[in-house]
Image (cartoon, helix red, strand yellow):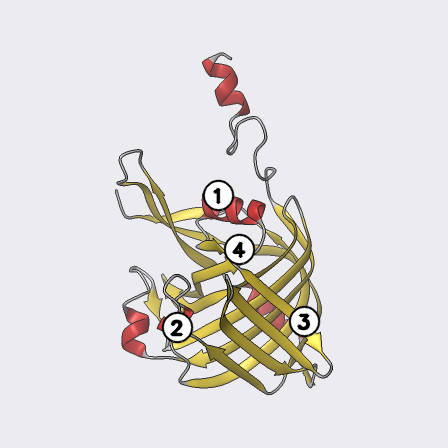
């Protein structure tokens, strides 16, 4: 294989059969349970990188079902997003993500810098309760519950929330172990079709774990909860800050 052939074919690893196809990526019937809670401001400041600014000591804990996604298939995700501001624009810094399928783990880390790790999250309806859980190995580290479809939310409020940009800290090491890429990446969702959104009473419990430390941002008070279903397209990202420049 000639060098030019490698460059022509190189998209992702492995060269012969990449774990995921080129984007952008469409998600159909993407379902979220988002529980917003107040946390310790000092701990939050220690985990959010500059030049992002923390708006208030708040974290959004998310459980997400993705039954139909381009190239990634059917999977579930769970993690934490911190409301932040960058250059005067509000968005969300993705602090932690745990999911159960290889292609979106590989693609999320390699393309955008999503902080994805392998675990076993779930989101399901049990009678009149929407239940989200996260297990890391045999250990339960997160449980979120919400009354099922108690109060309908207006579509414009959901569109506004989904339309805000997300921010990621992308880190890829050099062969000697030093950082070769260390960037702040911004991504957006587009072509959003809202199928429904609801709010209701909610509770969230996070348990300490050495390798899934979601409880490092402790729950001091649950502020609100949102259950929403939408079709979205995840665009490829852009670098907004290079820490190695």
Q: Are marks 1 and 2 in contact (CB under 8 Å)?
A: no
Q: Is residue 149 above or below residue 44?
A: below
Separation of disc 4 and disc 3 at Cα?
A: 26 Å
In the picture, the disc for residue 208 is: 2
N-terminal of the two: label 1 or label 2?
Answer: 1
Q: Nearer the viewer, mark 4 or mark 3?
A: 3
Residue at the image position 40 percent from the left and 85 percent from the top: 220
Quickly name the residue at label 4: 188
- Residue 157 visible from this viewpoint: no
Q: Position of residue 95 (x, y in %)?
A: 41, 62
Quadrant including the C terminus:
top left
Q: Residue furthest front?
A: 138
Query: Label 3's element?
Result: strand
Separation of disc 1 and disc 2 at Cα?
A: 30 Å
Quickly name the residue at label 1: 111
Question: Dot 3, how many residues are within 10 Å of its Cα: few (below 14), some (14-19), or many (20+)?
Answer: some
Q: Position of residue 216 (x, y in %)?
A: 35, 72
Query: Label 2's element?
Result: loop
Query: Label 1's element?
Result: helix
N-terminal of the two: label 2 or label 4?
Answer: 4
In the picture, the disc for residue 124 is: 3
Q: Is residue 231 above or below residue 62?
A: above
Residue at the image position 38 percent from the left and 78 percent from the top: 218
Separation of disc 2 and disc 4 at Cα?
A: 31 Å
Residue at the image position 31 percent from the left and 33 percent from the top: 175
Query: Label 4's element?
Result: loop
């Amino acid at each position: 294989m000639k060098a030019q052939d490698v460059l022509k074919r190189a998209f992702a690893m492995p060269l012969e059969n990449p774990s995921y196809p080129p984007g952008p990526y469409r998600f159909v019937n993407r379902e979220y349970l988002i529980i917003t809670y107040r946390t310790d401001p000092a701990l939050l400041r220690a985990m959010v990188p500059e030049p992002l600014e923390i708006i208030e000591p708040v974290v959004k804990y998310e459980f997400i079902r993705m039954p139909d996604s381009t190239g990634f298939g059917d999977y579930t995700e769970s993690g934490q997003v911190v409301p932040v501001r960058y250059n005067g624009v509000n968005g969300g810094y993705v602090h932690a993500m745990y999911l159960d399928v290889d292609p979106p783990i590989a693609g999320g880390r390699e393309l955008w810098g999503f902080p994805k790790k392998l675990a076993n999250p779930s989101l399901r309806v049990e009678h009149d309760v929407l239940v989200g859980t996260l297990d890391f190995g045999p250990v339960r580290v997160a449980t979120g519950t919400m009354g099922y479809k108690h109060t309908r939310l207006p579509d414009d409020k959901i569109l506004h929330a989904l339309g805000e940009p997300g921010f990621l800290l992308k880190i890829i090491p050099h062969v000697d172990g030093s950082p070769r890429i260390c960037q702040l990446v911004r991504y957006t969702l587009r072509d959003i079709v809202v199928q429904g959104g609801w709010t209701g009473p909610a509770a969230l419990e996070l348990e300490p774990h050495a390798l899934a430390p979601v409880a490092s941002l402790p729950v001091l008070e649950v502020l609100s909860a949102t259950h929403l279903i939408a079709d979205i397209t995840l665009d490829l990202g852009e670098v907004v800050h290079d820490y190695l420049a």
